[in-house]
Amino acid sequence: MTQPIWRSFTTLCCLILLCAAPVRAAITEADYQRVVDEAYSKYKDLKEGANADYIPILATVPSEMFGVVIVTREGKVYSAGEMDYEFSIQSVSKPFTASLIMAEQGAKTLREKIGVEPTGLPFNSKMALELYPERSVNPLVNAGAIAAVSLVQASSEEDRWNKVLGNIEAYAGRDLKVLEEVYKSEYETSWSNRGIANLLYNYERLYSDPEEALRVYTRQCSIGINTRDLGMMGATLANEGVNPVTGKRVLDKEDVPELLAIMATAGFYDESGEWMYRAGLPAKTGVGGGIVAVVPGKFAIATFSPPLNEAGNSVRGLRAIGYIAAELGVGLYGPNKEE
Protein backbone atom coordinates (compact mmCIF):
# COMPACT_ATOMS: atom_id res chain seq x y z
CA MET A 1 0.00 0.00 0.00
CA THR A 2 1.29 3.46 -0.89
CA GLN A 3 1.96 5.57 2.22
CA PRO A 4 0.49 9.10 2.42
CA ILE A 5 2.90 11.65 1.02
CA TRP A 6 3.09 13.49 4.38
CA ARG A 7 4.32 10.33 6.11
CA SER A 8 7.05 9.77 3.52
CA PHE A 9 8.09 13.41 3.78
CA THR A 10 8.26 13.20 7.60
CA THR A 11 10.37 10.07 7.38
CA LEU A 12 12.70 11.76 4.91
CA CYS A 13 13.08 14.80 7.19
CA CYS A 14 13.91 12.58 10.16
CA LEU A 15 16.57 10.77 8.15
CA ILE A 16 18.09 14.08 7.05
CA LEU A 17 18.20 15.32 10.65
CA LEU A 18 19.78 12.09 11.85
CA CYS A 19 22.41 12.22 9.13
CA ALA A 20 23.11 15.88 9.84
CA ALA A 21 23.39 15.42 13.63
CA PRO A 22 26.96 15.61 14.88
CA VAL A 23 28.42 12.23 15.79
CA ARG A 24 30.28 12.36 19.07
CA ALA A 25 33.54 10.44 19.10
CA ALA A 26 33.82 7.58 21.56
CA ILE A 27 35.16 8.57 24.97
CA THR A 28 38.78 7.47 25.35
CA GLU A 29 40.86 6.69 28.42
CA ALA A 30 42.64 10.00 27.87
CA ASP A 31 39.26 11.78 27.92
CA TYR A 32 38.31 10.22 31.24
CA GLN A 33 41.56 11.21 32.93
CA ARG A 34 41.51 14.66 31.36
CA VAL A 35 38.06 15.60 32.64
CA VAL A 36 38.79 14.18 36.10
CA ASP A 37 41.99 16.24 36.30
CA GLU A 38 40.24 19.34 34.98
CA ALA A 39 37.32 19.06 37.39
CA TYR A 40 39.67 18.59 40.33
CA SER A 41 41.85 21.53 39.32
CA LYS A 42 38.87 23.77 38.57
CA TYR A 43 37.16 23.35 41.95
CA LYS A 44 39.80 22.29 44.49
CA ASP A 45 40.23 25.84 45.80
CA LEU A 46 36.51 26.63 45.97
CA LYS A 47 35.69 27.92 49.47
CA GLU A 48 31.89 27.88 49.37
CA GLY A 49 29.78 25.85 51.80
CA ALA A 50 30.41 24.43 55.26
CA ASN A 51 30.74 21.00 56.86
CA ALA A 52 27.60 19.50 58.37
CA ASP A 53 27.61 20.15 62.12
CA TYR A 54 24.28 18.76 63.33
CA ILE A 55 26.25 15.51 63.62
CA PRO A 56 29.09 16.96 65.69
CA ILE A 57 31.92 14.76 64.41
CA LEU A 58 31.28 15.70 60.77
CA ALA A 59 32.36 19.25 61.57
CA THR A 60 35.85 17.92 62.36
CA VAL A 61 36.50 16.41 58.90
CA PRO A 62 39.16 18.49 57.06
CA SER A 63 37.19 20.75 54.74
CA GLU A 64 39.97 20.93 52.13
CA MET A 65 39.58 17.22 51.31
CA PHE A 66 38.52 16.73 47.69
CA GLY A 67 38.54 13.68 45.47
CA VAL A 68 37.13 13.00 41.99
CA VAL A 69 36.87 9.58 40.36
CA ILE A 70 35.38 7.91 37.32
CA VAL A 71 34.89 4.13 37.38
CA THR A 72 33.79 2.50 34.13
CA ARG A 73 31.49 -0.47 33.80
CA GLU A 74 34.63 -2.49 33.05
CA GLY A 75 36.12 -1.47 36.41
CA LYS A 76 38.77 0.96 35.14
CA VAL A 77 39.47 3.80 37.58
CA TYR A 78 40.46 7.38 36.73
CA SER A 79 41.09 9.62 39.70
CA ALA A 80 42.41 12.91 41.02
CA GLY A 81 42.84 14.23 44.54
CA GLU A 82 41.96 12.37 47.74
CA MET A 83 41.14 8.73 47.06
CA ASP A 84 41.94 6.85 50.27
CA TYR A 85 40.45 8.93 53.09
CA GLU A 86 37.52 7.05 54.62
CA PHE A 87 34.46 9.19 55.27
CA SER A 88 31.00 8.20 56.44
CA ILE A 89 28.70 7.17 53.63
CA GLN A 90 25.64 8.84 55.20
CA SER A 91 22.69 9.22 52.81
CA VAL A 92 24.59 7.90 49.79
CA SER A 93 23.77 4.51 51.34
CA LYS A 94 20.02 4.98 50.84
CA PRO A 95 19.55 3.82 47.23
CA PHE A 96 21.70 0.77 47.85
CA THR A 97 19.57 -0.38 50.78
CA ALA A 98 16.48 0.38 48.67
CA SER A 99 17.98 -1.98 46.09
CA LEU A 100 18.26 -4.65 48.80
CA ILE A 101 14.48 -4.46 49.26
CA MET A 102 14.09 -4.82 45.49
CA ALA A 103 16.42 -7.82 45.44
CA GLU A 104 14.67 -9.52 48.36
CA GLN A 105 11.05 -8.64 47.76
CA GLY A 106 10.74 -6.99 44.36
CA ALA A 107 10.39 -3.42 43.16
CA LYS A 108 6.63 -3.56 43.75
CA THR A 109 7.16 -3.99 47.49
CA LEU A 110 9.40 -0.93 47.64
CA ARG A 111 6.81 1.10 45.78
CA GLU A 112 3.86 -0.05 47.88
CA LYS A 113 5.38 -0.13 51.38
CA ILE A 114 7.65 2.92 51.13
CA GLY A 115 6.89 4.85 47.94
CA VAL A 116 8.79 6.47 45.08
CA GLU A 117 7.49 10.06 45.00
CA PRO A 118 9.91 12.92 45.73
CA THR A 119 8.76 15.00 48.70
CA GLY A 120 10.11 18.35 47.51
CA LEU A 121 11.09 18.98 51.14
CA PRO A 122 14.35 18.72 53.12
CA PHE A 123 15.72 15.21 53.66
CA ASN A 124 14.88 15.20 57.39
CA SER A 125 11.41 16.71 57.07
CA LYS A 126 8.72 15.54 59.46
CA MET A 127 6.16 17.73 57.75
CA ALA A 128 6.22 15.34 54.80
CA LEU A 129 4.88 12.61 57.07
CA GLU A 130 1.79 14.72 57.69
CA LEU A 131 1.34 16.11 54.18
CA TYR A 132 1.26 12.73 52.45
CA PRO A 133 -1.41 10.16 53.44
CA GLU A 134 1.09 7.35 52.73
CA ARG A 135 3.48 8.93 55.32
CA SER A 136 6.71 7.52 53.87
CA VAL A 137 6.84 8.24 50.16
CA ASN A 138 10.49 7.91 49.10
CA PRO A 139 13.42 5.71 50.20
CA LEU A 140 16.00 8.48 49.64
CA VAL A 141 14.82 10.78 52.44
CA ASN A 142 15.26 9.89 56.10
CA ALA A 143 11.71 8.65 56.70
CA GLY A 144 11.73 6.29 53.72
CA ALA A 145 15.29 5.17 54.40
CA ILE A 146 14.49 4.23 58.00
CA ALA A 147 11.43 2.39 56.71
CA ALA A 148 13.60 0.57 54.15
CA VAL A 149 15.93 -0.69 56.88
CA SER A 150 12.92 -1.92 58.86
CA LEU A 151 11.62 -3.74 55.78
CA VAL A 152 14.75 -5.88 55.32
CA GLN A 153 13.81 -9.49 55.97
CA ALA A 154 15.62 -10.44 59.17
CA SER A 155 15.33 -12.71 62.20
CA SER A 156 17.13 -10.33 64.55
CA GLU A 157 18.79 -6.92 64.70
CA GLU A 158 22.18 -8.53 64.05
CA ASP A 159 20.79 -10.35 61.02
CA ARG A 160 19.24 -7.13 59.74
CA TRP A 161 22.54 -5.27 60.11
CA ASN A 162 24.59 -8.01 58.48
CA LYS A 163 22.32 -7.97 55.44
CA VAL A 164 22.51 -4.18 55.12
CA LEU A 165 26.29 -4.14 55.48
CA GLY A 166 26.82 -7.15 53.22
CA ASN A 167 24.77 -5.56 50.46
CA ILE A 168 26.78 -2.32 50.52
CA GLU A 169 30.04 -4.32 50.61
CA ALA A 170 28.89 -6.21 47.51
CA TYR A 171 28.45 -2.92 45.67
CA ALA A 172 31.85 -1.61 46.83
CA GLY A 173 33.57 -4.93 46.14
CA ARG A 174 35.42 -5.09 49.45
CA ASP A 175 34.93 -5.46 53.21
CA LEU A 176 33.81 -2.28 54.95
CA LYS A 177 33.55 -1.22 58.57
CA VAL A 178 31.56 1.22 60.64
CA LEU A 179 33.32 4.38 61.76
CA GLU A 180 32.40 3.91 65.41
CA GLU A 181 33.06 7.52 66.43
CA VAL A 182 30.67 8.67 63.73
CA TYR A 183 28.05 6.16 64.85
CA LYS A 184 28.32 7.24 68.47
CA SER A 185 28.13 10.93 67.59
CA GLU A 186 25.19 10.41 65.24
CA TYR A 187 23.18 8.04 67.43
CA GLU A 188 23.56 10.19 70.53
CA THR A 189 22.12 13.18 68.68
CA SER A 190 19.47 11.39 66.58
CA TRP A 191 16.42 12.94 68.22
CA SER A 192 14.93 14.04 64.91
CA ASN A 193 15.32 10.62 63.30
CA ARG A 194 13.98 8.97 66.45
CA GLY A 195 10.88 11.12 66.14
CA ILE A 196 10.52 10.10 62.49
CA ALA A 197 10.87 6.40 63.34
CA ASN A 198 8.22 6.63 66.06
CA LEU A 199 5.82 8.53 63.81
CA LEU A 200 6.25 5.93 61.09
CA TYR A 201 5.59 3.15 63.61
CA ASN A 202 2.46 4.96 64.78
CA TYR A 203 1.23 5.21 61.19
CA GLU A 204 2.04 1.53 60.51
CA ARG A 205 4.67 2.43 57.91
CA LEU A 206 7.58 0.97 59.90
CA TYR A 207 8.09 -2.77 59.81
CA SER A 208 10.28 -3.47 62.85
CA ASP A 209 10.84 -2.08 66.34
CA PRO A 210 11.50 1.68 65.93
CA GLU A 211 14.67 1.80 68.00
CA GLU A 212 16.09 -1.24 66.23
CA ALA A 213 15.42 0.39 62.86
CA LEU A 214 17.03 3.62 64.09
CA ARG A 215 20.17 1.84 65.31
CA VAL A 216 20.63 -0.13 62.10
CA TYR A 217 19.93 2.93 59.95
CA THR A 218 22.44 5.00 61.92
CA ARG A 219 25.08 2.27 61.60
CA GLN A 220 24.37 2.14 57.87
CA CYS A 221 25.03 5.88 57.59
CA SER A 222 28.26 5.48 59.59
CA ILE A 223 29.89 2.97 57.22
CA GLY A 224 33.33 4.18 56.15
CA ILE A 225 34.06 4.36 52.43
CA ASN A 226 36.53 6.19 50.21
CA THR A 227 35.96 7.95 46.90
CA ARG A 228 37.05 4.91 44.89
CA ASP A 229 34.56 2.70 46.77
CA LEU A 230 31.79 5.12 45.97
CA GLY A 231 32.73 5.11 42.30
CA MET A 232 32.69 1.31 42.26
CA MET A 233 29.23 1.28 43.83
CA GLY A 234 27.96 3.56 41.10
CA ALA A 235 29.75 1.57 38.40
CA THR A 236 27.88 -1.53 39.59
CA LEU A 237 24.63 0.23 38.73
CA ALA A 238 26.11 1.46 35.44
CA ASN A 239 26.98 -2.19 34.73
CA GLU A 240 23.34 -3.28 35.09
CA GLY A 241 23.71 -4.48 38.67
CA VAL A 242 26.95 -6.46 38.37
CA ASN A 243 30.07 -5.36 40.25
CA PRO A 244 32.63 -4.79 37.47
CA VAL A 245 35.58 -6.13 39.50
CA THR A 246 34.13 -9.03 41.49
CA GLY A 247 31.61 -10.06 38.83
CA LYS A 248 28.94 -10.50 41.51
CA ARG A 249 25.39 -9.63 40.59
CA VAL A 250 23.95 -7.40 43.30
CA LEU A 251 20.70 -6.28 41.67
CA ASP A 252 18.63 -7.78 38.87
CA LYS A 253 19.11 -5.99 35.57
CA GLU A 254 15.35 -5.40 35.34
CA ASP A 255 15.33 -3.45 38.63
CA VAL A 256 18.21 -1.06 37.84
CA PRO A 257 16.12 1.41 35.78
CA GLU A 258 13.59 1.81 38.60
CA LEU A 259 16.34 2.50 41.13
CA LEU A 260 18.02 5.02 38.84
CA ALA A 261 14.66 6.72 38.33
CA ILE A 262 14.32 7.25 42.08
CA MET A 263 17.85 8.62 42.20
CA ALA A 264 17.06 11.00 39.34
CA THR A 265 13.96 12.41 41.01
CA ALA A 266 15.09 12.54 44.65
CA GLY A 267 18.85 12.00 44.86
CA PHE A 268 19.62 15.65 45.57
CA TYR A 269 16.80 16.15 48.08
CA ASP A 270 14.87 19.38 47.57
CA GLU A 271 17.16 20.59 44.79
CA SER A 272 16.83 17.46 42.66
CA GLY A 273 15.15 19.41 39.88
CA GLU A 274 18.02 21.88 39.83
CA TRP A 275 20.48 18.98 39.66
CA MET A 276 18.75 17.27 36.76
CA TYR A 277 18.54 20.61 34.98
CA ARG A 278 22.27 21.10 35.48
CA ALA A 279 23.72 17.61 34.97
CA GLY A 280 20.94 15.29 33.82
CA LEU A 281 22.27 12.25 35.70
CA PRO A 282 20.74 10.02 38.40
CA ALA A 283 22.77 10.60 41.54
CA LYS A 284 22.83 10.44 45.33
CA THR A 285 24.45 12.74 47.84
CA GLY A 286 25.29 12.48 51.52
CA VAL A 287 26.03 15.01 54.26
CA GLY A 288 29.38 13.29 54.80
CA GLY A 289 30.48 14.96 51.55
CA GLY A 290 30.09 12.11 49.08
CA ILE A 291 28.19 12.12 45.79
CA VAL A 292 27.81 9.35 43.23
CA ALA A 293 26.28 9.84 39.77
CA VAL A 294 25.55 7.11 37.24
CA VAL A 295 25.80 7.20 33.45
CA PRO A 296 23.71 4.08 32.66
CA GLY A 297 25.58 1.46 30.68
CA LYS A 298 28.85 3.42 30.76
CA PHE A 299 30.40 4.62 34.02
CA ALA A 300 29.95 6.34 37.36
CA ILE A 301 31.36 9.59 38.70
CA ALA A 302 32.04 9.94 42.43
CA THR A 303 33.33 12.82 44.49
CA PHE A 304 34.17 13.57 48.10
CA SER A 305 34.31 17.06 49.60
CA PRO A 306 32.82 17.89 53.02
CA PRO A 307 31.60 21.52 52.63
CA LEU A 308 27.88 21.48 51.82
CA ASN A 309 25.35 23.95 50.49
CA GLU A 310 22.09 24.73 52.29
CA ALA A 311 20.37 21.68 50.82
CA GLY A 312 23.06 19.37 52.26
CA ASN A 313 24.92 18.66 49.02
CA SER A 314 28.68 18.89 48.50
CA VAL A 315 29.50 22.16 46.75
CA ARG A 316 32.71 21.04 45.05
CA GLY A 317 31.25 17.64 44.26
CA LEU A 318 28.14 18.85 42.48
CA ARG A 319 30.18 21.35 40.48
CA ALA A 320 32.78 18.72 39.49
CA ILE A 321 30.22 16.14 38.39
CA GLY A 322 28.25 18.75 36.49
CA TYR A 323 31.43 19.80 34.70
CA ILE A 324 32.36 16.22 33.77
CA ALA A 325 28.85 15.43 32.54
CA ALA A 326 28.89 18.54 30.35
CA GLU A 327 32.39 17.97 28.97
CA LEU A 328 31.68 14.36 28.05
CA GLY A 329 28.14 15.07 26.89
CA VAL A 330 26.64 12.25 28.93
CA GLY A 331 23.59 13.89 30.52
CA LEU A 332 20.52 11.76 29.85
CA TYR A 333 18.80 14.65 28.12
CA GLY A 334 21.74 15.88 26.11
CA PRO A 335 25.03 17.68 26.77
CA ASN A 336 24.13 20.54 29.14
CA LYS A 337 26.78 23.19 29.58
CA GLU A 338 27.24 24.61 33.06
CA GLU A 339 26.59 28.33 33.31
Image: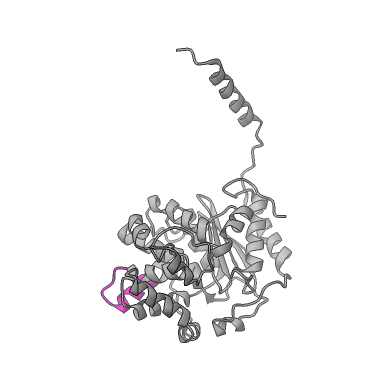
Residue at the left extreme, as displayed = 155
Can residue 131 be seen from the camera position used here? yes
Who's the residue at 56% across and 73% down the image?
287
Q: Quadrant of the C terminus?
A: bottom right
* Residue 63 horizontal side relative to residue 223, left or right: right
Majority SS type along the magenta span: helix
* Residue 22 horizontal side relative to residue 254, left or right: right
x and y, in percent, of residue 218 in the image: 44, 78
Q: Does the magenta-highlighted stretch encompass residue 155? A: yes
Q: Which residues are magenta?
A: 152-165
Rendered image coloring scheme: one colour
Q: Quadrant of the N terminus?
A: top left
x and y, in percent, of residue 137 in the image: 42, 62
Q: Does the magenta-highlighted stretch encompass residue 121? A: no
Can residue 219 be seen from the camera position used here? no
The quadrant where residue 17 appears: top right
Who's the residue at 38% across and 57% down the image?
251
